[in-house]
Each structure stands twice: as structure tokens, then as C-alpha cells.
Amino acid sequence: MPRTKGDHEARRRDVSEAVWRVLAAHGFGGLTLRAVAAELDATTGLLTHYFPAKRDLLAHALDLLEQRTSARPRPAGGDGLSAVRTALLGILPLTAEATASNRIWVSSWDTALADPAVSANHARMYAQSRDRLRDLVATAQRLGELPAGDPARIAEGAQSFVLGLVVQALLNPTAFPPDRQAGLLDDYLAALASAPPSPR
């Protein structure tokens, strides 16, 4: 019986799930056709229909990472400083799913540094995140919950803080459990809220 379009799409979803499981377990450094084939209990020959070259596999993995990061549920944060806090909490590895996603992101940095196109795409995504954060900061400033200053600069500092905290938590989860991460973020935001206005 010939395979239908539905069969093909279901198989492609299975392949994507296998790619994601390999990424979660081994990062981009362990992402190979052989590893995905073993996870899928299939042959590498079958996978070459989807990924003729290693670069195609990497491109698919990066697409998956972007899609899953964008689709990850995030709590509503209200307005003002509360919304800033919620956005920053959404970056941290506070759950098993967020931890897996962050582990994969960090493992992708080596690939990005070696490939200008991937590097540019990563830079674009981080810039988009900063832009969203900048708008939240500006709202908090209008509400009087954050001091005056350049909201873009404040967003840059906040993003840098949480990305550094992500790395610390991934490398030493015992020292940086979820409640510790949230507490450090609250300390950072309290200091930010009480700082004197900075020049724009």
C-alpha cells in the first residue's frame, strides 16, 4: 500500500521528536544522523531522505529550537514591573522543560560561533527578546515603577543578567535551584527599581 501524505507528515513529526530528544540529552555536540537514527530505531539511510547533509540536520534542529522556545507556555505578568519580572522568569530554567530548552540553547552557541549565518540568526532572536523587554521596561517607567533612563539600555542589562544566571543554573543546579534563581532575580529588580534615574 502506498504511503499517504498523512503517513509522511507523521513520520516527519517522529523524526523531529527524535531530533529534540537527542538535543535534550546530548546538545548540538552530540547531534548526528547516527544518534537520531538510534533514537528513532531506524537506519541512517532513512534519515538522509530528510537531511541529505549534516548542515540540513543542524538547520532543522535550530528551527525546532526556535519554534519550541516561542511556543513554550509562559505565565501572564500583568503590567509594569510585574510584567518585566514575568518575562525574565520565562527565560530562566525553572522547570524541566525550560531547563532542557536552555541546555539546548547554550549547546547551540558553539555552532553559532562557527557559522556566521547561525550567529546572525541567534543575534536576531536575542535582539527581538531585548526589544520586547524594552517595551515592558518603558511601561514600568511610565507607571513610576522603574526610574527614568534609556529603556533599551535597561533591557540590555536585564537580559545580560538573566542569561548569566541561566549559565550558572545549568552548570550548578544544586547551588541555583528555581527558588534561588527567582530570589536573585527579585534582588536584581529591587536594586533596579531603587536606583537613581540614569541619563537617557
Image (spheres, rainbow, N blue to C red):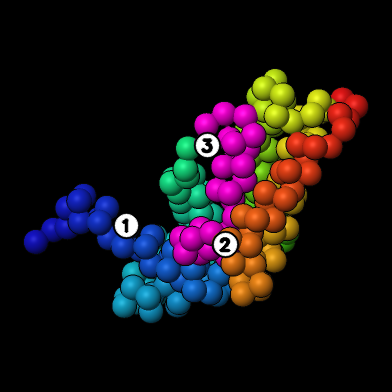
Q: Is mark 1 on a helix, strand or loop?
A: helix
Q: Distance between the residues labelled 3 and 2?
A: 18 Å
Going by the numbered disc 2, the residue's amino acid type is Pro
Q: Disc 2 marks which residue?
A: 178
Is the stretch drawn in magenta largely helix, strand or loop? helix
Q: How far apart are marks 1 and 2 (CA)?
A: 31 Å
Q: Disc 3 marks which residue?
A: 77
Q: CB under 8 Å between callouts 1 and 2?
A: no
Residue at 20 percent across and 51 percent down: it is: 6
Specify few, some or many for label 3: CA neighbours under 10 Å numbering under 14, 14-19, or 20 or more: some
Q: What element carries label 2?
A: helix
User: Which portion, as a residue range, is magenta?
Assistant: 77-106
User: Is residue 167 found inside the magenta-colored segment of the image?
Assistant: no
Q: Disc 1 marks which residue?
A: 13
Precedes in sequence: disc 1 or disc 2 = 1
Going by the numbered disc 1, the residue's amino acid type is Arg
Q: Does any portion of residue 115 appear in the rendered image?
A: no
Residue at 56 percent across and 42 percent down: it is: 86
From what the image shows, is residue 155 above or below residue 5? above
Residue at 87 percent across and 25 percent down: it is: 200
Going by the numbered disc 3, the residue's amino acid type is Gly
